[in-house]
Amino acid sequence: MITIHPFTIVEYDAVIALWQQCEGIGLSDADERDRIEFYLERNPRTSFIAQDDGAVIGAILCGHDGHRGFIHHLAVRSDYRRQGIATQLVVRGLDGLTAVGIRKCHLLIFNKNESGIAFWQHDGWELRQDINIMSKHI
């Protein structure tokens, strides 16, 4: 039976293993245990995991900066895809954002992640061509 519940640092090892095996997920030092723990503490009730018989099969890392929501990672194990699990995770994340007053959410996705872009567009997300993201390590 598949269950969905808030992502806590207890599941970090299983979630990072899932992210590492899923195409389209880019990991960096920002995804190390202490950074994810800080993120989850700062954004309670907006990130979730899906489990089947105790095994992590899906996860969303979702939060906000007080102004906009952000989805950083969404992944479902390949043998569990096309069952609506990703959509359920997204709904939970967006509901969590709505509950704290966030009204708009952005997500980060690689340009070459065609299946990911198709998933998001099918769910009504707009691929923006008018903005870019810039990054700097500090």
Image (tube, rainbow, N blue to C red):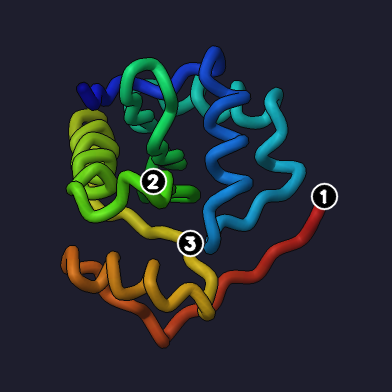
- In the image, residue 122 above or below residue 55: below
Quadrant of the rendered image containing residue 13: top right
Mark 1 = which residue?
Answer: 138
Residue 41 placement (x, y as % from top left): 51, 19
The kind of residue on which mark 2 rests is Val
The residue mark sitting in front, 3 or 2, is: 2
Which residue is painted at 60% across and 30% down in the image? 36
Return the residue found at the far front. Answer: 79
Q: Residues within 10 Å of mark 2 (few under 14, many from 20)?
A: many
Label 3 or label 2, whichever comes before in sequence order: 2
Say what amino acid the circle numbered 3 marks: Leu
| Label 3 Cα crowd, 10 Å radius (few <14 / some 14-19 / many 20+) | few
Residue nearest the observer in this picture, 83 or 138:
83
Name the residue tied to disc 3.
Answer: 108
Residue 42 visible in the snapshot: yes
Report the front residue among 107 and 130.
107
- The single residue placed furthest to the right in the displayed view is 138
**Based on the displayed image, in which of its 4 quarters is residue 49 positioned?**
top left
Give whichever of discs 2 and 1 has the lower sequence position.
2
Quadrant in which residue 93 is drawn: top left
Q: CA distance from mark 2 to mark 1?
A: 31 Å
Residue 76, which numbered label? 2
Above or below, 94 against 107 in this view is above
Give the mark nearer the N terminus: 1 vs 3.
3
Q: Nearer the viewer, residue 14 or 135?
A: 14
Judged from the image, the secondary structure of the residue bearing numbered disc 3 is loop
How far is the residue under mark 3 from the one under mark 2? 16 Å
Q: Is residue 113 above or below residue 55?
A: below
Of residues 9 and 83, the one nearer the viewer is 83
Q: Residue at x 37, y 59 (%)?
A: 106
**Which quadrant of the figure contains the N terminus?**
top left
Type of amino acid at the residue the image marks with label 1: Ile
